Amino acid sequence: MIQVTRSSMPDFQEYCDEIRDLWNSRWLTNMGAKHDQLRGELESYLGVPHVTLFSNGHLALEGAIASMGFPEGAEIITTPFTFVSTTHAIWRNRLNPVFCDIRRSDYTMDPDRIEELITEKTCAILPVHVYGNLCDTDRIGAIAKKHGLKVIYDAAHAFGEIRDGKSAASFGDMSMFSFHATKVFHTIEGGAVCYADDALSQPLDDVKNFGIRGPEEIAGPGGNAKMNEFQAAMGICNLRHLKEEIAKRKTIADLYYKILSGCEGIFLCADQPGLARNYGYFPILLDGPYDRDDLHAYLAEKDVFTRKYFYPLTSSVDCYRNCGGAAETPVADYVSSHVLTLPLYADLAAEDAERICELIIKRR
Ligand SMILES: *Cc1c(COP(=O)(O)O)cnc(C)c1O
């Protein structure tokens, strides 16, 4: 049986050695030594001035939005072609998502469609570096600047990526990462917000730790989204091996690319020039002789589990019906109903990847 993903794990003994200190210190959470160590390592790995760690990626994104202090009912322009967390993070801050269409070439937000969605209520743009394809950050940044908007990236798929010498963590006002077990780099559950402006540290700390600033000082109604020491220890271990993990993923992705590119009815994302990828996902778009749902079911029968990622569009979820449906984002609607992500993880065997390709090609 081949799952769509499989968590990377450090050697068992390596993790035990990493957490041994915790039995001495008895400091298990609340920004302990492991938390601070991981934060420092991530700041240098990602090449950003500030990282604030969270218990998971969703709360990191919710916290990033909350820390900006947007007025209730304001609008955020975002993409419906994403994990539903992105849209929930906007809604749960009492803000309104406004859905922008995506580009056919790389499935990221289409900069040509943004300005027509801007109203006097718009406060921010929230694009997603989907599958590790980086957004057109230059054009999005220029639009935001022209209209006085903030930009928050959902960079959950782009951990460690670099384009033309620039870290994927450095775009916009803030970038959110997820360190969920299924991601390229993980802390079991976990997440982070990266940013350059020193002034954002305090509001982010407030939202993740009850607004507590001192033993007798509460700044406001913050929540609890702290990363604990066991999570941080897993991150410290995983970061040591990340380079090899990505190299192994690249081998499999290259193999998929070699076999599937040019096949009738199968369309692959165009490579982005200058981008050092993390190979988190391998999406294929199916058309012509293929029916995506049929292939998905057929592969499952053969014990190969692929994912309709992302389907449905978040704009099709009942609670967002009033925010403009799939008809308003035709490219996203098309991609969502034709895309499939293939199994991809560091220790997926090359023979298995070849067999998956064979099954796909035979089903045409
Ligand atoms: C994984 C993911 C999230 C949520 O992160 P969690 O750590 O699972 O809370 C948000 N957005 C995208 C695009 C993701 O892939």
Image (cartoon, grey):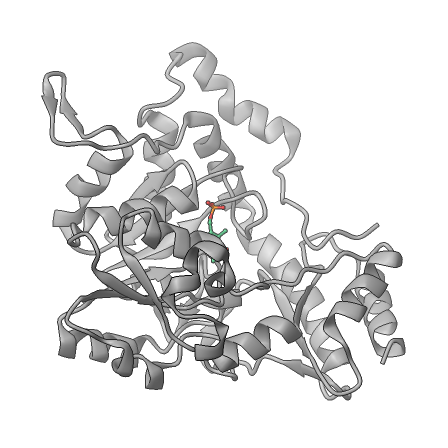
Q: Is residue 249 left or right of residue 195?
A: right
Q: Is residue 161 left or right of residue 221?
A: right
Q: Please tell me whether residue 119 is drawn above or below residue 48 in the rendered image.
A: below
Nearer-the-camera pick, 185 or 85? 85
Nearer-the-camera pick, 281 or 21? 281
Nearer-the-camera pick, 51 or 118? 118
Q: Is residue 217 left or right of residue 4?
A: left
Residue at image coords 85%, 54%: 303
Residue 106: in sight, yes or no? no
Q: Please tell me whether residue 340 is drawn above or below residue 26 in the rendered image.
A: below
- Where residue 347 appears, as percent x and y from the top left, is 72, 52
- Where residue 228 appears, as percent x and y from the top left, is 41, 27
- Where residue 314 appears, as percent x and y from the top left, is 48, 61
- Where residue 207 appears, as percent x and y from the top left, is 24, 37
Q: Looking at the image, which residue sits at the far front? A: 322
Residue 146: in sight, yes or no? yes
The C terminus sits in image quarter: bottom right
Q: How many marks?
A: 0
Residue at image coords 34%, 52%: 91
